[in-house]
């Protein structure tokens, strides 16, 4: 009986031992799997920490960028406000400048500006003004003049100082200006001023701003060869060939100029065709001579050295082109002569006068 109990106990111990081994094996397997899971969790935790750290860094950068953009916006806002204020100030300044310019021009509405008149010591400006009145056939009373003086140029140069005349009335200023323009050509010689003859210019007394604007307008018009329709119509004579028709009192002019009698007859017979062409601001007079075409180039208002006659007498010559009128002033040892060429359609009339002669000569041409 004891043997049976021992055998049964041994069998139970074996079973218990096997169970313990099985449990131990299961525990070891569980521990291994648990450890594996823990290792996996640790690895994932490290990755999560790295991700969180990276995300935190990105958030910090985003915050920094946002702050930078905010600062820039503030700076731009300040600059914009400053620019807006500056523009407002500039607009106000421009408005004030325009108003000042307007008031200055209003103050000059009775003024004329005379330019290119040679300066002389102890000169009498009123006498010069009286001579201008005689030449333009309009009396200028002394008691109608409020102020009369020369003014320096804005930039230092050798040109004569301009003369400013202030009249009591706006109408007298306009009448003198209109008479000067109708005269179509006035020189310092006409005013009795000795020395080289100069073209005298009479204009409204403009402010510095308006002068600059006028100068820029002329430069643009010159660049693009622009002419108002009326001017273009007046200058339709350019390029036309004009043939001599007849002459009046031309021999009297030649005698007054000291041309010998033996040369007067030949000069009277010399009546070449003539043509005026333009290239930009340069003009060319082309005349037909027995030796072939003769060309004389010039710019309006600019004096140049020239010769005249068969003996090639040296002279100073100046052409002024004004619409359909071309006025030539010749200064020679024997005096000053003016040739005013007036074009009217296909007709050309050349009126000749001289400071040494009281008469008037004319030569007539017709377009071929």
Image (spheres, rainbow, N blue to C red):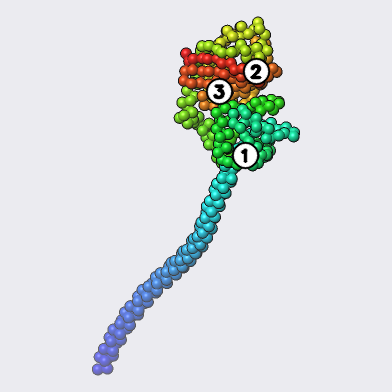
Pick the residue in front: 348 or 94. 348
Element marked by disc 3: strand
| Mark 3 vs 1: CB contact within 8 A | no
- The residue at the point 71 percent across, 25 percent down is 195
- The residue at the point 67 percent across, 32 percent down is 128
Label at residue 144 = 1
Work out whether mark 2 precedes mark 1 in sequence or the reverse, and give the earlier one.
Answer: 1
Give the distance between the C-alpha atoms of the residues marked 3 and 1, in whole angstroms. Answer: 33 Å
Label at residue 357 = 2
Mark 3 Cα shell of 10 Å, populated few (<14), some (14-19), many (≥20) = some
| Image location (x, y in percent) of residue 227 | 49, 30
Q: How many badges with numbers are in the image?
A: 3
Could you tell me which quadrant the N terminus lies in?
bottom left
**Residue 207 visible in the displayed image:** no
| Image location (x, y in percent) of residue 273 | 53, 12
Mark 2 Cα shell of 10 Å, populated few (<14), some (14-19), many (≥20) = some
Work out whether mark 3 precedes mark 2 in sequence or the reverse, and give the earlier one.
Answer: 3
Element marked by disc 1: helix
Rendered image quadrant of residue 105: top right
Give the distance between the C-alpha atoms of the residues marked 2 and 1, in whole angstroms. Answer: 33 Å
Give the distance between the C-alpha atoms of the residues marked 3 and 2, in whole angstroms. Answer: 21 Å
Element marked by disc 2: strand
Nearer the viewer's eye, disc 2 or disc 1? Answer: 1
- The residue at the point 40 percent across, 72 percent down is 41
| Image location (x, y in percent) of residue 104 | 58, 46
- The residue at the point 52 percent across, 34 percent down is 220
- Report which residue position mark 3 lands on: 326
């Amino acid at each position: 009986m004891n043997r049976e109990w021992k055998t049964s106990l041994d069998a139970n111990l074996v079973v218990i031992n096997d169970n313990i081994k099985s449990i131990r094996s299961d525990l070891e397997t569980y521990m291994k799997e648990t450890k594996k899971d823990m290792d996996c969790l640790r690895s994932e935790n490290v990755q999560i920490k790295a991700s969180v750290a990276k995300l935190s860094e990105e958030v910090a950068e985003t915050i920094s960028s946002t702050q930078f953009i905010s600062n820039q916006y503030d700076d731009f806002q300040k600059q914009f406000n400053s620019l807006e204020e500056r523009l407002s100030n500039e607009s106000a300044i421009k408005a004030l400048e325009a108003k000042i310019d307007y008031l200055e021009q209003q103050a000059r509405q009775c003024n004329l500006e005379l330019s290119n008149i040679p300066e002389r010591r102890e000169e009498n400006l009123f006498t010069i003004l009286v001579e201008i009145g005689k030449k333009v056939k309009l009396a200028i009373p002394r008691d109608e003049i409020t102020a009369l003086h020369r003014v320096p140029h804005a930039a230092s140069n050798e040109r004569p100082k301009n003369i400013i005349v202030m009249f009591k009335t706006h109408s007298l200023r306009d009448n003198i200006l209109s008479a000067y323009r109708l005269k179509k050509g006035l020189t310092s010689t006409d005013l009795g001023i000795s020395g080289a003859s100069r073209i005298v210019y009479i204009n409204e007394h403009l402010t510095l701003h308006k002068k600059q604007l006028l100068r820029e307008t002329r430069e643009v018009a010159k660049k693009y060869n622009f002419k108002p329709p009326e001017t273009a119509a007046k200058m339709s004579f350019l390029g036309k060939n004009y043939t001599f028709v007849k002459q009046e009192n031309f021999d009297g002019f030649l005698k007054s100029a000291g041309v010998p009698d033996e040369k007067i007859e030949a000069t009277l017979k010399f009546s070449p065709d003539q043509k005026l062409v333009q290239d930009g601001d340069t003009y060319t007079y082309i005349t037909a001579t027995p030796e072939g075409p003769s060309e004389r180039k010039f710019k309006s208002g600019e004096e140049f050295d020239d010769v005249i006659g068969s003996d090639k007498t040296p002279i100073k010559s100046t052409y002024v082109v004004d619409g359909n009128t071309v006025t030539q002033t010749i200064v020679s040892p024997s005096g000053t002569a003016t040739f005013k060429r007036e074009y009217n359609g296909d007709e050309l009339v050349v009126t000749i006068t001289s400071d040494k002669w009281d008469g008037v000569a004319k030569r007539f041409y017709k377009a071929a």
